[in-house]
Amino acid sequence: TQELLQAYERLLNRRPELRNKITLMVVSVTANPHMTVYRRAQRNIEELAGRINGRFGELDWQPIVLITTAQPFEDLIAHYRAADICWITPLRDGLNLVAKEFCAARTDEDGVLVLSEFTGAAVELPNAVLTNPYSSRAMDATIDQALNMAPAERRMRMRELRANVRHFDVGHWARHC
């Protein structure tokens, strides 16, 4: 999440015309508040988001909305449907179900999924815009690609992503495990 926030900060620096036009919503709920490593990571995320909001925010616009409490699933679906881009770029991860939830929620067949090439979902969702979160240059290029993507390409990619989510469902997983 820290790499994503840093990429967003660079985006606002590089492209000032996007200020007041885009907002990054980050849902960051501490996995286990009793573990020091998780508390430290959460504190770093909150400090970075606060710094970016303080640097770029205005009275009528906050660049980052940071949600630190668990959200009802219905609210998450509403956020997925309202988002133009779902940006999931962990440094290492298993099969990231948030990516699949985003695609499944996009019944309008629009939106862009930006996904770390290190997530398990990247194998099943090749029509996502894949990025290397260890590379600032790659992160910057892929968010620009997602923001500038033509509507026809967004819809084509999302149709393919949704088809893959339907194919690689829980039944598929159970048969192959």
Image (cartoon, rainbow, N blue to C red):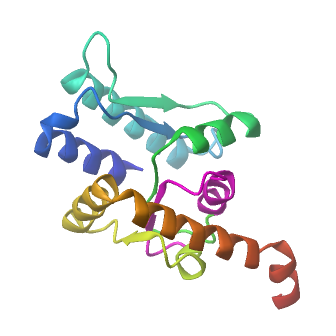
The segment highlighted magenta reads: 97-119
Relative image position of residue 110 (x, y in whole percent)? 52, 54
Identify which residue, 101 or 151, lies in the foreground. Answer: 151
Residue 129 within the segment the image draws in magenta: no
Relative image position of residue 80 (x, y in whole percent)? 59, 44
Which quadrant holds the C terminus? bottom right
Q: Residue furthest top?
A: 59
Res. 51 image quadrant: top left
In this rendering, the answer to whether 84 lies above or below 150 is: above
Residue 71 in view, yes or no: no
Identify which residue, 161 or 46, lies in the foreground. Answer: 161
Residue 169 in view, yes or no: yes
Q: Is residue 148 left or right of residue 111?
A: left
Q: Residue furthest bottom?
A: 176
Residue at image coords 30%, 68%: 134
Identify which residue, 80 or 88, lies in the foreground. Answer: 80
Relative image position of residue 108 (x, y in whole percent)? 61, 51
Relative image position of residue 91 (x, y in whole percent)? 42, 66
In this rendering, the answer to whether 73 lies above or below 163 is: above
